[in-house]
Amino acid sequence: MASSTRASLDNPPSDPAHQATTSSPHSLSKAVHARRAEYTRPLKIKIKIGTWNVAACPGTERDLEAWFVQGKGIHEQLSGVKISDGFGEDGDHIESVAAQEARQTKKESTVPKGDISVVPGGEEIGLYVLGLQEVVDLSSAREYVGRVYTDTGPTTKWRKALVDALPPGYVMIAEQQLSGLLLFIFASPDVAPTISSVSTVSVGTGIMGYLGNKGAVTTRIVLGETTRMVFVNSHLASGHDPAHLERRCWYDSISKSRFPKSVGEIREMLLINFLCRDVTQILQRTHFEPISWAGVLEDVQEEIGQEDFAFWFGDLNFRLDGLPGDDIRRLLMLHTKGEYDVGQKSRVKTDGELAENDGPIVIHSIESDDESSDGELEARSSSNFDQGDDTSSNYLPDPDDFIQDPSQDPASLQATLDSLLPHDQLKHMQKKKKAFHDGWREGPITFLPTYKYDVGSMGMFDSSEKKRAPSWCDRILFRTRRDRLEYEAKKQEEENARIKDEEMKARGLDHAGDDEDVLFDYNPDDDGVEEPATVKDYDEYDEDEADQLEAFVTKEGYMDKIQLDVYTSHQRVLSSDHKPLDAVFTLEYDAVVPELKQKIQHEVARDLDRAENEGRPGITVVVDNSQDIEESPTSKRPALKRVSTSGSGGVDFGNVAYLQRKIRSLTIANTSTVPATISFVERPSLSGEGNRIAPPWLSVSFIESATDEDERVLQQLNREVTLEPGDAVNATLEVFIDDITLVRALNDGSLLDDVLILRVTDGRDHFIPVRSVWLQSSFGRSVDEELIRISEGGVRALLPRPGSNGPPVNRGREVCWSAPREIFKLTEAVEILTERVLADANMLESAQLPKKFSKLAF
């Protein structure tokens, strides 16, 4: 993995305070994502994808290291890859094909000795992805059912082979077996820690449409917390007949939305609708687990098509249409026979087959036309032999015999491949919009068909009785997010054009210009359909374009680039009837640096918290204790004690006596930048008298601070007050004990404590403690049981209860008075008051009014 410098489409970081006002996980994630340019760095890695149908052949795992990891087993002339490029080797020391086939055994690798690495491998690769097919023999349904869920041996065997082949330190990211399908993903020590959200899904499409003898194993990963990648290892329905072909494919819903016009179309649509279509099943039934972004789980499961990069590989089983299998075999063997020495076993077989037919081979060019009849296709592609021609079949046909004139040397292998590729079923299906037409691409095919060979042979195509036609069954397709979006945009354009055409026909405007002179005729059915931009002819591949990385924007808004470096088969691997195929991609992507992201997360969380606090209403509570009156130690006159404290310290009323009123004031100011609505919270009453904001002995009310004393009584506010920023309001708290029942409870030890809850709407609550000390009173006490037993000093001189918070007690509990002292004081007070009244009356009797008031009547 290497870093690189390149342009980014990221917008400048924005202030997270303006993006979210609450610090929820979603807002935090969005704010962090907005600053992604600060914690992502561009990286470059190589991804190697290999696919191989091992046909359950023993010993195939011994070739894995050579071809997949080391990049060996390439045939220069038969693969289109030049070994001498950049390697400084002439290849003369590589084991010959004859010697290689002669020593082929199941106990050692079949790759030629002395071979050199051609395809990038080793520690140069950041991500290895291997898809295998037919790792177990499932030739019968009975054997399949018995082994499908129990046989883990192949996984263990191939895992060990791959771990032993890879450089030290590579980490397994995913492993999944579905019967004969097996998928492995390994990452280098640098890349592995950056991979997350791994989800693997197996979909069986085989027997009964669900079992795993056919189907796909798909894995989704997230690379660098930025790039979604999907890898699909599939084995589609085998067979060359049209029914098997249709089973592998699906129809585009828009292009086939019109009603069928002929019996042939009806039969074709019924066949497609009722057959189990492998690709459709894989797409519909593959659902990945939701991705977790910074701890926030996505709401929905993802499917194939929502990724940034997708790679679909495996034995897709697409064949060559419209050509006799014997002609294909003969034509390709003309190129492979030169690799064998005269007299060698494979050379003898090749010469024998070529000698069976000595006529020329003519491959006609065909077009992918939906309405081509079978007879026309056969006429275009049939092989006609001129019995009078003396041309030997041991030589390439005359270039003039080819109706299609390749751009390269007609005698070259690539010219032969270019003449066969137009018959490829996959290409036909893409043009007909039945399969892999929605943005899927493939690299240039410069190698021989990967199927079917004699096991142990480099270039001997199937020599059994069936003599199966060679085909490019094994493929590696890829698609970027941009490819899919371009296809969907074009698809929508075609749908809009179709709707417009139908509207014109309904209005009778489609034949409006029949009687007028026009430059050309336009038929929407024929002229309006164009090939998707991503489906190219194989001879249209531009090597100059391949040298430049293709850039696009990912789903998460990052700029990624990808380039296909190598796409080739390993012709000199002999242990299976399929040749292994691999592709190497260079990927540039933005990767998250965990340390930087953690730092940004802390900054964003702090900013969001500050922004949230600034955007929420807030108040400050100040307690005014100016009403406290205490005796001055130097004077008998009362002194005023003015104290202002924070509301967090609570309201202290000091000593409270029976029928003594005490008042405290709270100043509540809005110190935030937004309006604040405040109110005291009501609580349920134990006595069932309804909800109250304070106990019965405490009253609370709001009074505007701007009014004078006379208006405060008239303008008491409601229980809910809204303050604008900078405004304030006073709250008056008053304690008054006049309930004799409450007096008895207080004498028995109840406390005059409470907590008021001042609620700020959309803000935090303020808890205001209220404290006071009850002065014991003789009121509410029994004369016989208590008052006559209280010693000198009265009830307020009683000693506290030892080891308890209960009421004070008279420890002696002896009778001290014949009558309560309080009664004595009352009688004395009555006597004194009586004397005063009598004295005042006597004074008034002898008093005379002034003359000027004597005439006034009272």
Image: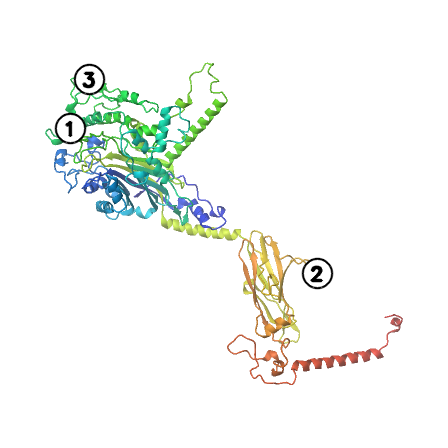
Q: Which residue is mark 2?
A: 710
Q: Which residue is mark 3?
A: 386
Question: In the rendered image, is residue 523 in sight?
Answer: yes
**Residue 522 drawn above or below residue 546:** above
Residue type at tag 1: Gly
What is the residue that sits farthest to the left in this orientation?
343
Q: Which residue is mark 1?
A: 338
Residue type at tag 2: Asp
**Residue 539 drawn above or below residue 61:** above
**Residue 590 drawn above or below residue 491:** below
User: 244 or 562: which is nearer to us?
Assistant: 244
Number of other residues with Cα within 10 Å of mark 3, as a class: few under 14, some 14 to 19, many 20 or more: few
- The residue positioned 18% from the left and 27% from the top of the image is 333
Marks 2 and 1, how far apart in space?
A: 119 Å
Please tell me which of labels 1 and 3 falls first in the chain. 1
Element type at marker 2? helix
The quarter holding residue 691 reads bottom right
Q: Mark on residue 807? A: none
**Apparent side of residue 319 relative to residue 605 in the rendered image (left or right):** left
Residue 312 point in image, percent of width and height: 31, 37
Residue 166 point in image, percent of width and height: 23, 45
Mark 2 against mark 1, which lies toward the viewer? 1
Locate the C terminus and report the quarter of the image it occupies. Answer: bottom right
- The residue positioned 57% from the left and 74% from the top of the image is 749
Element type at marker 3? loop
**Residue 118 drawn above or below residue 373:** below
